[in-house]
Image: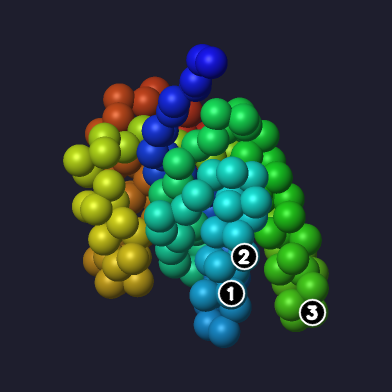
């Protein structure tokens, strides 16, 4: 019997709509857990979820049974609906339309996990926009500045 053997580590980044600062305690850790649970339910086990007040980082294994676009649609839609139930101030909680996703070498997984877990410390020194641009440039991704920040 043939097998399809896949191990695709992905570092996924997306922000709140218009980079609104809506992710903070006590909802932050609950949101991270919800995102991880959603990925797991879609057969994309999570190694780390983190972020800051206006964005999320997820490191997961992309399942052979789901396209990246579908994973992100489901993760963002369900977590946005979930956040809206947590407090009236989140009635207009939305994620940006786009996202960024980067493959991760298995030898670099622990480095990415540490990076994701230290987001608050990291963002004392660097904005999300600068961080995001540096990832795009590091991975040689061409982008149009007008559409990156929806």
Q: Could you say where residue 32 lies in the image, as x and y percent from the top left?
A: 53, 66
Mark 1 neighbour class, 10 Å CA radius: few under 14, some 14 to 19, many 20 or more? few
Instruction: Report helix, strand or loop for mark 3.
Output: helix
- Binning the other alpha carbons within 10 Å of mark 3 as few (below 14), some (14 to 19) or many (20 upward) gives few
Instruction: Tell me the crowding category of disc 2: few under 14, some 14 to 19, or many 20 or more residues within 10 angstroms, Cα based.
Output: some
What is the CA distance from the residue labelled 2 to the residue labelled 3?
19 Å
The nearer-to-camera label among 2 and 3 is 2
In the image, taking residue 44 as reference, residue 139 lies left or right, namely: left
Q: CA distance from mark 1 to mark 3?
A: 16 Å
118 vs 84, left or right, is left
Looking at the picture, tell me which residue is in the foreground, 119 or 39: 39
Callouts 1 and 3 close, C-beta under 8 Å: no
Compared across the picture, whether 140 is left or right of 102 comes to left
The residue mark sitting in front, 1 or 3, is: 1
Residue 88, label in figure: 3
Of residues 97 and 86, the one drawn nearer to the viewer in this rendering: 86
Q: Position of residue 71 (x, y in %)?
A: 63, 39
The secondary structure type at the circle numbered 1 is helix
Q: Are marks 2 and 3 in contact (CB under 8 Å)?
A: no
Please say if 86 is above or below 46.
Answer: below
> Does the residue at mark 2 contact the one at mark 1 (Cβ under 8 Å)?
yes
Residue furthest bottom in the image: 26
Q: Which mark is residue 30?
A: 1
Q: Is residue 95 visible?
A: no
Circle 2 sits on which residue? 34
């Amino acid at each position: 019997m043939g097998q399809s053997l896949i191990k695709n580590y992905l570092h996924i980044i997306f922000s709140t709509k218009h980079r609104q600062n809506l992710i903070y305690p006590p909802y932050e850790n609950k949101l991270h857990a919800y995102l991880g649970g959603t990925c797991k339910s879609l057969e994309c086990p999570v190694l780390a979820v983190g972020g800051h007040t206006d964005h999320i980082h997820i490191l997961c294994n992309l399942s052979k049974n789901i396209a990246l676009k579908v994973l992100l649609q489901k993760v963002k839609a369900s977590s946005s609906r979930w956040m809206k139930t947590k407090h009236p101030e989140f009635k207009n909680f939305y994620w940006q339309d786009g996202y960024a996703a980067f493959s991760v070498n298995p030898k670099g997984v622990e480095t990415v996990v540490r990076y994701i877990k230290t987001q608050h410390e990291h963002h004392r020194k660097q904005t999300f926009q600068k961080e995001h641009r540096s990832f795009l440039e590091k991975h040689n991704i061409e982008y149009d500045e007008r559409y990156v920040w929806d």
